[in-house]
Amino acid sequence: MLQTIPLHNDFGVELPGIDLKEATHDFLYPELRAAFEEHSLLLIRGQDWSDEDILRFGRLFGPIENRTDGPDFVSAVSNVRPDGSVLLPDALRLKDLQANMLWHTDSTFLPVPSLANIITARVVPTSGGTTELVSTRAGLARLPQHLRDALAGAFEHRLTHSRRKIDPDLAQADHITKWTGQTWRGIWTNPVNGQDAAYIASHACGIAGMDAGPAQDLIDEIIDALTPEDAIYAHQWQVGDVLIWDERATLHRAMPWPYEQPRTLASICVSASAADGLDTLRPSA
Ligand SMILES: [Fe+2]
């Protein structure tokens, strides 16, 4: 039985005394997975692990999300360039990072969206750079009825939509435009415990059967209602911290830091599968 320390009234636990490198399909992972299903957000501190360790651990949850034709890899969420200098303020890559500051859940625009994000801190700034999260399971239960009704509809998600909010040039970059839209139900039911969560993101650009303007107003109203100040867990990173969050039941956003300082998180997403309830998310289901 894992020891758990609550992070927030709505969701999230810290799991002390764990070395994630020891996890296998039969050891530690079953308890971690059960905690993931129940709490939506796990914090494990003090991990010292390589990219290979992270990928091996991630595969316990499912296939590693890979947007390239090459082998799986760990993404550096970083403002550090290969030569060690930091990105300039107008760099498109920095704007890509800034687009992460819109409330979202990852990869809703991919044909197979994410189940989990596994992310660890390697270089942290002296201030700022927190990651903020909310539970969309607890949030859904608090929404007024008209917003719950709206989430019963089908939502279109496009990466170009969220990037255009930051910079029109960013929205035209090849790595953004290569992803066409996907449509998902606005509620993801967890198949393990039957709990519903709102499934929405900054990438949401339309609702089936509605004009674009009113749909965007409704999407904005839903995200605002899911993210009041008191619903937020803000994680102040320390080197070696690992967060594992359930993409089906949370929203997250990055917060700014002094960009002259280097900051590097290492991140992978794990793709969702039918066993995670993906099939029931399709509007045709
Ligand atoms: Fe993200």
Image (cartoon, rainbow, N blue to C red):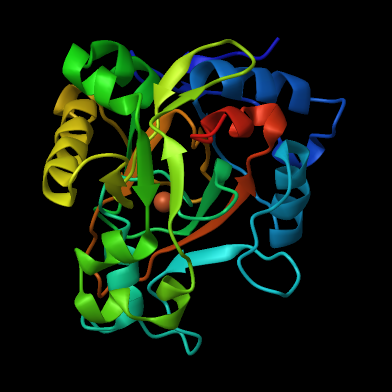
**Residue at the limit of the structure toward the right, as seen here:** 26
Q: Position of residue 43 (x, y in %)?
A: 51, 32
Report the front residue among 5 and 223. 223
Q: Residue at x 56, y 45 (%)?
A: 114
In this view, 85 is above or below 236: below
Residue 227 visible in the snapshot: yes
**Residue at the limit of the structure toward the bottom, as seen here:** 83
Q: Residue at x 77, y 25 (%)?
A: 28
Q: Write down the quadrant of residue 183 in the picture.
A: top left
Quarter occupied by the N terminus: top right
State left or right for residue 13 relative to residue 68. Answer: left
In this view, 137 is above or below 111: above
Q: Write down the quadrant of residue 32 in the picture.
A: top right
Q: Position of residue 273 (x, y in %)?
A: 68, 38
Report the front residue among 93 and 201. 201
Q: Residue at x 45, y 17 (%)?
A: 196
Residue 7 visible in the snapshot: no
Quarter occupied by the C terminus: top right
Q: How many marks?
A: 0
Q: Position of residue 225 (x, y in %)?
A: 17, 27
State left or right for residue 227 relative to residue 125. Answer: left
Report the front residue among 201 and 269. 201
Q: Position of residue 279 (x, y in %)?
A: 62, 32
Q: Residue at x 69, y 51 (%)?
A: 54
Report the front residue among 232 and 137. 137
